[in-house]
């Protein structure tokens, strides 16, 4: 029996850099979340939808209460209103693009974009993961942190992400307009596990607010690989294990230890055991963002191999195994978080390579390779084998920094030429 076609979902491009390249000032600490840019943000959303994006991401990457309220700039209530308003801007753009449709078929989707804790720091630390305590340590070591410092860090990062999620969910109109929750540019295994802890708590609160499963959204976790390497030194296999294994100690069956996931399950384990006693939720997609196109092919192959191994391990149940791959690389330039400027990476002759068409073709090649990857599964007793796609949840693909309307249009034409 032939496999069904690969499901590709076209995402948008880089909001902040598209605003910047259009002449708008994005130099504030809020970047594209600055309320002064509301009209311009709506225009960028509309431009990406017109270019063929099937889902747009809200301009909320750095948005959090502390950034809006710093130095007494505004009240917490006003900060929450502004955070919610960015979702409304995206929804307005989708509604405008959907005018004339007789149904919701083909209607653009909206993803709530949530950057890591490091995106709220000045200068930003999303490419390094060097966080101050209690979210730190602010430097890495080959020896594991103490259990107390590790659990303190996990707890602080969990609370950071949970508080943001609750801000959006407590307004039903805002929450109802969202299709995905998109955790992106994650630089640390520790933060990945903290996000999953936050999502476990959050889904419980959603059930209380909206009824069992009524308010739950699909969600993904996308990781950053500056220069092709994960910032805290972890391998892709470790990243994938931290993303999808229901409990950290399940990693032992994959040739990994709990230390490989960021902590040492040694003598003082009670606090760690308590955190992970209840099964962690599994995201509907995992993958890569804000990473140079030069690295995405090998990284994507490593992700695929690691997911295939976990799917074969039996740790995931039937619903958890329907995982998609998300890929939205940058345009190939290097961003300096201190000077807030872009430059051509060392050894690269041209920032644009062969131009927009080249970027779209290269990303599409990787997306197809990932989407078409298969694995062999066996029925109970091993009597019957069948072929299935590794990424049965499909492939979500777009662009990040320095990718604008033309890049997304080119990607759409590469992967969905018959649909325009």
Image: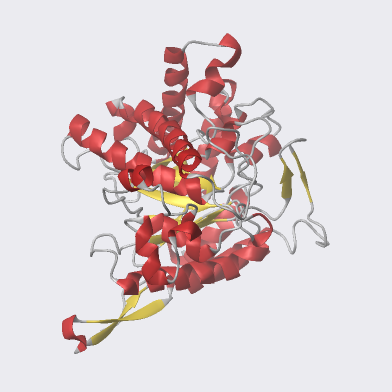
Quadrant where the N terminus is found in the figure? bottom left
Q: Nearer the viewer, residue 147 or 246?
A: 147
* Residue 240 shown left or right of residue 20 in the figure: left
Q: Quadrant of residue 352?
A: bottom right
Q: Number of labelled discs?
A: 0
* Residue 340 shown left or right of residue 304 in the figure: right
**Image coordinates for residue 283, horizontal then vertical, percent:** 36, 53
Q: Nearer the viewer, residue 308 or 252?
A: 252
What colour scheme was applied to this rendering of the protein? secondary structure
**Image coordinates for residue 358, horizontal then vertical, percent:** 67, 65
* Residue 76 shown left or right of residue 230 in the figure: left
In the image, residue 277 sits, relative to residue 21, either above or below, namely: below
* Residue 135 shown left or right of residue 270 in the figure: right
**Image coordinates for residue 38, horizontal then vertical, percent:** 54, 25
Q: Residue extending furthest front? A: 267
Q: Quadrant of residue 172?
A: top left
Residue occupying image coordinates x 50% and y 51%? 189
In the image, residue 283 sits, relative to residue 370, either above or below, namely: above
**Image coordinates for residue 377, horizontal then vertical, percent:** 29, 80
Residue occupying image coordinates x 78% and y 55%? 345
In the image, residue 67 sits, relative to residue 394, either above or below, namely: above
Q: Quadrant of residue 380?
A: bottom left
Task: Determine if residue 6 is in view.
Answer: no
Residue occupying image coordinates x 42% and y 30%? 164
Residue occupying image coordinates x 26% and y 48%? 278
Task: Determine if residue 60 is in view.
Answer: yes
């Amino acid at each position: 029996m032939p496999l069904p076609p690969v499901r590709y979902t076209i995402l948008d491009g880089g909001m902040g850099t598209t605003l910047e390249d259009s002449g708008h000032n994005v130099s504030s600490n809020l970047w594209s979340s600055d309320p002064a840019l509301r009209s311009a943000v709506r225009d960028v959303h509309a431009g990406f939808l017109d270019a063929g994006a099937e889902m747009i991401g809200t301009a909320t990457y750095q948005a959090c209460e502390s950034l809006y309220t710093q130095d007494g700039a505004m009240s917490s209530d006003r900060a929450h209103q502004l955070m919610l308003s960015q979702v409304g801007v995206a929804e307005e753009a989708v509604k405008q693009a959907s005018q004339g449709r007789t149904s919701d078929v083909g209607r653009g989707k909206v993803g709530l974009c949530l950057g890591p804790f490091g995106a709220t720091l000045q200068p930003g630390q999303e490419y390094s993961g060097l966080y101050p305590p209690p979210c730190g340590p602010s430097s890495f070591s080959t020896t594991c942190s103490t259990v107390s410092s590790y659990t303190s860090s996990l707890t602080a990062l969990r609370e950071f992400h949970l508080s943001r999620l609750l801000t959006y969910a407590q307004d039903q109109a805002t929450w109802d307009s969202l299709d995905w929750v998109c955790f992106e540019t994650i630089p640390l295994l520790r933060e990945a596990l903290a996000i999953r802890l936050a999502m476990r708590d959050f889904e419980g609160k959603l059930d209380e607010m909206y009824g069992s499963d009524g308010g739950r959204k699909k969600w993904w976790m996308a990781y950053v690989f500056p220069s092709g390497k994960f910032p805290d030194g972890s391998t892709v296999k470790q990243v994938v294990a931290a993303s999808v294994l229901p409990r950290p100690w399940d990693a032992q069956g994959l040739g990994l230890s709990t230390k490989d996931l960021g902590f040492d399950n040694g003598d003082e384990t009670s606090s760690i055991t308590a955190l992970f006693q209840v099964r962690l939720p599994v995201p509907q997609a995992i993958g890569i963002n804000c990473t140079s196109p030069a690295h995405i092919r090998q990284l994507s192959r490593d992700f695929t191999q690691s997911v295939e191994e976990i799917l074969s391990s039996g740790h995931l149940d039937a619903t958890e195994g329907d995982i998609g791959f998300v890929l939205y690389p940058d345009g190939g330039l290097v961003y300096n978080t201190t000077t807030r400027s872009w430059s051509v990476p060392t050894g690269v002759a041209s920032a644009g390579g062969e131009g927009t068409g080249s970027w779209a073709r290269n990303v599409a090649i990787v997306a197809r390779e990932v989407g078409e990857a298969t694995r062999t599964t066996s029925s109970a007793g091993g009597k019957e084998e069948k072929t299935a796609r590794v990424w049965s949840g499909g492939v979500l693909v777009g662009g990040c920094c320095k990718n604008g309307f033309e890049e997304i249009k080119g990607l759409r034409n590469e992967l969905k030429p018959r649909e325009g």
